[in-house]
């Protein structure tokens, strides 16, 4: 982890719980389907995250970035179906579209192996008509959907940066109020690994505080084998932390 050398974060500690907070604090007000979709966009990963696999190269659990689309595209499709069953078509539509963003934008990661490229393309091909039918059912225009999709993607990227999965400083693309695109710049405060600044500031509040849970890595920073990792994962020991995003 870039910012958290002694900790291994639960991927859900920030990416699920605080995506909605980013959107709730936005300078505009949005409906509940967008807020819920932002919070739950990774619902398809939940089973995978509760049964981590061991990466012998790092001596740690596999990071989500190390798993190919042949593994997670079916999980994402399952997550979309779960979202529809639990919360309806609008939330499921946004979660599906976020998967589309992942598979169409980051082709360097998902098209390395033939099986992964096929799985990513199959997700895009399968979900496109489903997304179109849901949009028609809900009466949602493409411009509105593009904005909501961009907000979920931005909140996802911000949370990954706060978790240390993306190196900062870094620029992100955000949807502006007038429908155009805005570039926002994220940096860390010197000497404060959990404090970040963002400009221009797109939120109604001056500071967004995020709380999360993490597990302390062993002193060596890695596990000797899978059994040791599983014992660590099964133990109740966790620590809480706070990260702040500010002007």
Image (tube, grey):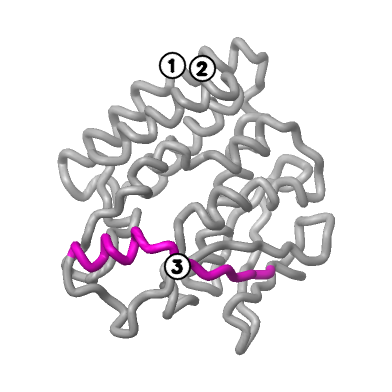
In magenta stretch: residue 18: no
Q: Residue at x 52, y 70 (%)?
A: 239
Badge 3: how crowded within 10 Å, few (<14), some, or many (20+)?
Answer: few
Q: Which mark is residue 237?
A: 3
167 or 218, which lies in front? 218
**Residue underneath mark 1:** 129
Disc 1 element? helix
Check residue 227 for magenta coloring: yes
Q: CA distance from mark 1 to mark 2?
A: 5 Å
Task: Decide if residue 100 is on the left or right side of residue 107.
Answer: right
Residue at 63 percent of width and 69 percent of height = 243
The boundaries of the magenta stretch are 226-244
From this view, report whether residue 154 is shown above or below residue 184: above
**Disc 2 target residue:** 132
Is residue 165 visible to us here?
no
Q: Are marks 1 and 2 in contact (CB under 8 Å)?
A: yes
- Tell me, yes or no, if residue 156 can be seen here: yes
**Label 1, label 3: how far apart the Cα atoms are:** 45 Å
Residue pictured at 59% horizontal, 70% vertical: 241
Percent across and percent down for residue 177 are 78, 44
The residue at 22%/34% (across/down) is: 118
């Amino acid at each position: 982890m870039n910012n958290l050398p002694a900790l291994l974060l639960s991927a859900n500690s920030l990416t699920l719980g605080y995506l909605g907070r980013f959107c709730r604090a936005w300078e505009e007000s949005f409906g509940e389907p967008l807020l819920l979709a932002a919070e739950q966009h990774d619902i398809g990963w939940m089973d995978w995250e509760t049964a981590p696999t061991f990466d012998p190269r790092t001596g740690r659990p596999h990071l989500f970035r190390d798993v190919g689309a042949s593994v997670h595209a079916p999980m994402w499709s399952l997550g979309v179906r779960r979202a529809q069953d639990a919360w309806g078509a609008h939330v499921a539509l946004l979660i599906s579209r976020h998967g589309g963003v992942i598979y169409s934008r980051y082709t360097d990661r998902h098209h390395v192996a033939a099986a992964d490229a096929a799985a990513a393309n199959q997700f895009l091909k399968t979900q496109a008509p489903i997304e179109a039918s849901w949009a028609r059912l809900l009466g949602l225009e493409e411009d509105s959907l593009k904005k909501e999709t961009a907000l979920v993607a931005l909140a996802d990227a911000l949370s990954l940066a706060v978790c240390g999965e993306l190196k900062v400083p870094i620029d992100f693309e955000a949807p502006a109020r007038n429908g155009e695109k805005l570039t926002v710049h994220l940096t860390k405060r010197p000497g404060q690994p959990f404090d970040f600044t963002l400009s221009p500031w797109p939120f109604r509040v001056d500071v967004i505080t995020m709380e999360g849970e993490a597990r302390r890595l062993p002193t060596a920073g890695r596990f000797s084998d899978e059994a040791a990792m599983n014992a660590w994962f099964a133990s109740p020991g966790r620590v809480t932390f706070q990260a702040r995003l500010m002007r």
